[in-house]
Amino acid sequence: MFIEVLKSKIHRAKITQTELDYVGSITIDENLMDAANMIEGEKVLIVNNNNGERLETYIIAGERGSGMICLNGAAARKAAKGDIVIIISFAMMEFEEAKKFVPSLVFPDKLNIAIVD
């Protein structure tokens, strides 16, 4: 039996910009992606702590060390610059494997610099 479990989480990152006129996705600083064990193109759930919005999209790699968290396309309407979001990815795995799996958790500072738990 396969179950879906938390794989990675960037907890309480700050939206640095929004780009409405873009195809779509979320742009994330590559340092944050590495710390959270996330890759470009990976599906993520975005939870906005400021307004309660939730949306699914995919990751585009942003400039390393920039602290960038940018919602693009229609997703840009779901957040404002300065909003605090949680970026979550999940993985499918066998039940027994899932019991032992340890997700990657990242707690960025106020500049979106990765602090790994």
Image (spheres, rainbow, N blue to C red):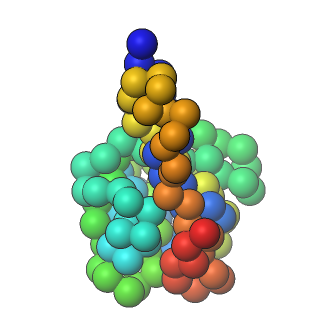
Q: Is residue 44 above or below residue 32?
A: above
Name the residue: 29% across, 57% down.
Answer: 39
Across the whole image, how many numbered discs are drawn on residues?
0
Q: Nearer the viewer, residue 5 or 100?
A: 100
| Residue 50 position in % (x across, y down) | 74, 56
Q: Quadrant of the N terminus?
A: top left
| Residue 67 position in % (x across, y down) | 46, 80
Q: Is residue 92 above or below residue 100?
A: above
Q: Quadrant of the C terminus?
A: bottom right
| Residue 29 position in % (x across, y down) | 38, 74
The quadrant holding residue 82 is bottom right
Residue 77 visible in the displayed image: no
Q: Is residue 53 left or right of residue 21?
A: right
Q: Residue furthest top?
A: 1
Q: Nearer the viewer, residue 28 or 104?
A: 104
Q: Nearer the viewer, residue 25 or 90?
A: 90
